[in-house]
Amino acid sequence: SADVLDIAYLEWNPQGARSAVLLHGWPDSPHAWKDLAESLADAGYRVLAPALRGFAPTRFRDASTPRSGQLAALACDLLAFVDSLALQRPLLVGHDWGARAVASACGLREGVASHLVMLSVGYASNDPQQVLSLPQARSFWYQWFMATPRGERALRE
C-alpha cells in the first residue's frame, strides 16, 4: 500500500540482491515488462512492475479521493511504493508516461535511484494550439482513439 493507493504489482526474483522498478506507459500494463523483467531477474535483480494509478488492479484506498493523472501524483505514488517496500536506491526504468514519472520522482527526491532509464519519452507541448505534422498526428492515433466512447469500450472489454 502507498499513501492513497493499494498498488498492485508483478514481481520476479523476490530474493534478488538489487532491486529494479519498472513503470509502464499508456495504455500498457506491467505485463509489457515481462521479457526485460526476466532478463533483469536472471542478472540478480528483484524486479517489481507496479500497475500505475488508473490501471487495474491498483485501486484508490478511499473512493472519495480526487483522481489525478498529473506527473507529480505519479511520481509521489512511485516514491510511496519504494518506501512501502523499503527498497534501497532501486534501478528505476520507465516507458512513455512511466518515464516521465521516474524522472519526476528523481527530481523530487535526490538519491532515490541507483540509475534512471527512460524509454520512449513523450515530451510534447501541452499547448492545445500546437500544430502537428501528418506523421506526428499518425503516431498519436491511439491517444485520440482512447478518448472516444469506442476506445473506452475497447479498454473495458
Image (spheres, rainbow, N blue to C red):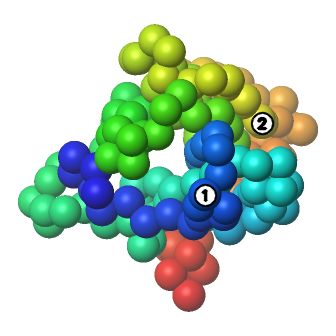
Q: Quadrant of the C terminus?
A: bottom right
Name the spot of residue 20 as percent of width and height, x first.
64, 43
Asked if residue 73 is positioned above or below residue 8 in the image, the reply reads above
Q: What residue sits 58% from the left and 34% below the top?
A: 90
The front one of 44 and 145 is: 44
Which quarter of the rendering shows the N terminus?
bottom left
Q: In which image quadrant can residue 33 be found? A: bottom right
Residue on which disc 1 sits: 15
Q: Which of marks 1 and 2 is in front?
A: 1
- Three-letter amino acid code of the residue under disc 1: Gln
Pointer 1 local density, CA inside 10 Å: few below 14, some 14–19, many at least 20: few
Residue shown at the point (39%, 41%) measured from the top left:
86
Secondary structure found at label 1: loop
Crowd band around label 2 with a 10 angstrom C-alpha radius: few (<14), some (14–19), many (20+): few
Q: What residue type is labelled 2?
A: Ser
- Residue visible at 64% across and 40% down? 18
| Camera-side residue of 121 and 92 | 92
* Whether residue 142 is situated above or below residue 121 in the rendered picture: below
**Circle 2 SS class:** loop
Ranked by sequence position, the earlier of labels 1 and 2 is 1
Q: In this image, 4 relative to 134: left or right?
A: left
In the image shown, does 36 or 149 lie closer to the viewer?
A: 36
User: Where residue 27 sits in the image (x, y, percent)?
Assistant: 62, 59
On the image, which quarter does residue 64 sit in?
A: bottom left
Q: Mark 2 points at which residue?
A: 120
Residue at the spot 50% in from the left edge and 15% down from the top edge: 111
- The answer to whether the residue labelled 1 contacts the one labelled 2, judged by CB atoms less than 8 Å apart, is no
Q: Where is residue 152 in the image (x, y as percent from the top left)?
A: 51, 73
